[in-house]
Image (cartoon, grey):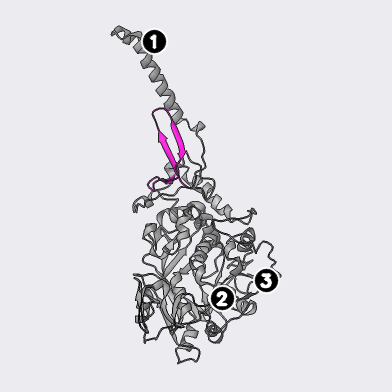
């Protein structure tokens, strides 16, 4: 009433005063509603993003299927109105900002609890407790593993491949189709005009391979094969469901059989569930079920808990014998590739190895290493992995030990003594820090899965971070994710934009279905 008398005193009409007072009251009500957290609405964020439209009196949240929220919107600012509960329903920004200072900022109050809740939904997606049928995008085909019986392991016969990657003129192999931009014929003469990135008479040698060959101690004559080698890719599995998806999607066109070993013991010797088999039965990667060989190991070596190297060797040495026992049709010149689940070469390099003769064994790759996601680049720590040999070399030289392929010094000294009837020996590395041959996805998991990996690691390669309770908490690991920092507190990664990672260019699925890999494409813990 005091305000009303003041306006009347100065000659303002009662009608005008009433309008002014009504507007003031209305604005106060709006402000109270906007600040009242007790009535805030929790929304499930769609994959395509969330668009916030604001007016003077209200907020409207509407779906926007054409744009995603910009990456500059931090998770902490959005958590006030958005409940990140259902993976894979989380926004992804379309731009990249390499902020080198915010990584050191502490978490805001309540931010850790929001992160924990959202990451828990990721953990549950492939959890041993999730029994719902699993259907992933474009993952067609029957669920062959639905009723798989561990007591009746499948046997496989490798297919007899024809060479469809080269053009044949008058019955003679001529040009490599993916590497040839034009075929010129002048009478009986045929010239292959190479596309960018390929070289050689047949345009079948990738530039990265040509560079790697030039660094060898001697010259090698590389010739195309009329019948491709078959390629077996073997690995062990712990908890890397998302990374294994990416690996299989990137290299499947070159792989004839995936051999994946899973044990009911951790590398440390503790009981563990068969997570991969559980999810295969749910329908995980159905499209590849026909060429996935699950290897079950239900024993742990004496002394393995005290000496982790004994455990690691024991586990790895069961891969090659399983292949010999359960795979028929093997030829001596077929390829056996043993790499960790998180180590993946570019697929055209595997095709090159299948389609050519004349290069030395064993073959390795220099990989671009990333930590926690494709947003922290370990630029100063590229990963070198030696893991490719022929079946005959696996049998005669490595004595059926896939572990020896990784770099046994005793085997290397034996090989260096002279020539061998099965082929030439010289460790051949493809790639360099200037031109990587693939990717290494180190610690690509949620914080809780990282803790699982820490505590299940072999008792070796000290310091064993799983022995430090303070490093096995969600808060601590989430802080490492934010900082791009390793467990030693000294090693730091460099920020990188997803669009700048050329080793992922052959993985369109990753970009088409980013929602399933969102936590490894953009840093959820970023400030």
The residues bearing labels 1 and 3 have C-alpha atoms spaced at a distance of 87 Å
Residues in magenta, as a range: 47-75
Q: Position of residue 298 (x, y in %)?
A: 66, 70
The circle drawn on residue 313 is 2
Asked whether, in this view, residue 274 is left or right of residue 55, the answer is right
The span from disc 1 to disc 2 (Cα, nearest Å) is: 87 Å
Q: Quadrant of residue 507?
A: bottom left
Local crowd size for mark 2, using a 10 Å CA cut-off: few (<14), some (14–19), many (≥20)? some
Secondary structure of the residue carrying numbered label 2: helix
Neighbour class for label 3 at 10 Å: few (<14), some, many (≥20)?
A: few
**Which residue position holds label 1?**
1
**Residue 458: x and y, percent?**
55, 68
Where is 346 relative to 170, above or below? above
Residue 151 falls left or right of residue 179: right
Question: Is disc 1 placed on a helix, strand or loop?
Answer: loop
Q: How many marks?
A: 3
Residue 408 in magenta? Answer: no
Report which residue position mark 3 lands on. 153
Point out the frontmost of discs 3 and 2: 3
Q: Vertically, is 165 above or below 111?
A: below
Q: Which mark is residue 194?
A: none
């Amino acid at each position: 009433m005091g305000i009303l008398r003041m306006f009347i005193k100065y000659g303002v009409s009662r009608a005008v005063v009433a309008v002014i007072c009504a507007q003031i009251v209305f604005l106060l009500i709006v402000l109270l509603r906007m600040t009242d957290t007790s009535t805030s609405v929790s929304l499930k964020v769609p994959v395509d993003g969330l668009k916030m439209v604001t007016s003077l009196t209200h907020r409207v949240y509407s779906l926007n299927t054409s744009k995603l929220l910009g990456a500059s919107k931090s998770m902490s600012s959005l958590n006030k109105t958005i409940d990140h509960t259902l993976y894979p329903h989380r926004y992804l920004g379309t731009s990249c900002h390499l902020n080198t200072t915010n990584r050191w900022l502490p978490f805001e109050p309540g931010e850790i609890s929001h992160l924990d809740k959202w990451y828990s939904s990721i953990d549950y997606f492939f959890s041993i407790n999730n029994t719902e049928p699993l259907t992933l995008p474009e993952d067609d085909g029957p669920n062959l593993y639905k009723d798989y019986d561990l007591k009746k392991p499948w046997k496989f016969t490798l297919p007899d491949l024809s060479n469809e990657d080269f053009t044949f003129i008058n019955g003679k192999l001529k040009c490599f189709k993916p590497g040839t931009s034009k075929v010129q014929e002048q009478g009986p003469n045929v010239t292959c005009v190479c596309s960018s990135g390929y070289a050689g008479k047949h345009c079948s040698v990738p530039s990265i391979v040509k560079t790697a060959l030039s660094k060898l101690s001697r010259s090698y004559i590389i010739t195309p094969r009329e019948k491709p080698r078959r390629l077996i890719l073997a690995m062990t599995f712990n908890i890397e469901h998302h990374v294994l998806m990416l690996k299989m999607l990137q290299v499947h066109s070159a792989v004839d059989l995936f051999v994946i070993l899973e044990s009911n013991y951790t590398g440390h010797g503790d009981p563990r569930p068969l997570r991969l088999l559980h999810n295969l039965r749910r329908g995980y990667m159905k499209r590849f079920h026909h060429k996935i060989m699950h290897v079950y190991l239900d024993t742990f070596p004496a002394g393995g808990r005290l000496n982790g190297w004994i455990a690691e060797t024991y586990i790895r040495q069961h891969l090659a014998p399983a292949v010999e026992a359960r795979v028929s049709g093997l030829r001596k010149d077929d390829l056996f590739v043993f790499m960790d689940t998180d180590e993946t070469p570019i697929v055209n390099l595997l095709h090159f190895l299948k389609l050519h003769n004349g290069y030395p064994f064993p073959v390795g790759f220099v990989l671009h290493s990333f930590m926690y996601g494709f947003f922290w680049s370990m630029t100063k720590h590229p990963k070198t992995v030696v893991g490719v040999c022929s079946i005959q070399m696996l049998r005669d030289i490595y004595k059926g030990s896939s572990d020896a392929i990784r770099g046994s010094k005793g085997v290397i000294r034996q090989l260096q003594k002279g020539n061998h009837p099965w082929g030439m020996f010289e460790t051949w590395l493809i790639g360099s820090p200037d031109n990587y041959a693939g990717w290494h996805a180190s610690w690509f998991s949620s914080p809780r899965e990282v803790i699982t990996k820490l505590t299940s690691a072999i008792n070796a390669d000290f310091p064993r971070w799983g022995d430090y309770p303070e490093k096995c908490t969600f808060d601590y690991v989430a802080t490492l994710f934010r900082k791009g920092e390793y467990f030693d507190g000294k090693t730091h990664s460099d920020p990188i934009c997803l669009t700048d990672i050329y080793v992922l260019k052959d993985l369109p699925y990753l970009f088409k279905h980013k929602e399933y890999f969102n936590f490894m494409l953009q840093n959820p813990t970023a400030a």
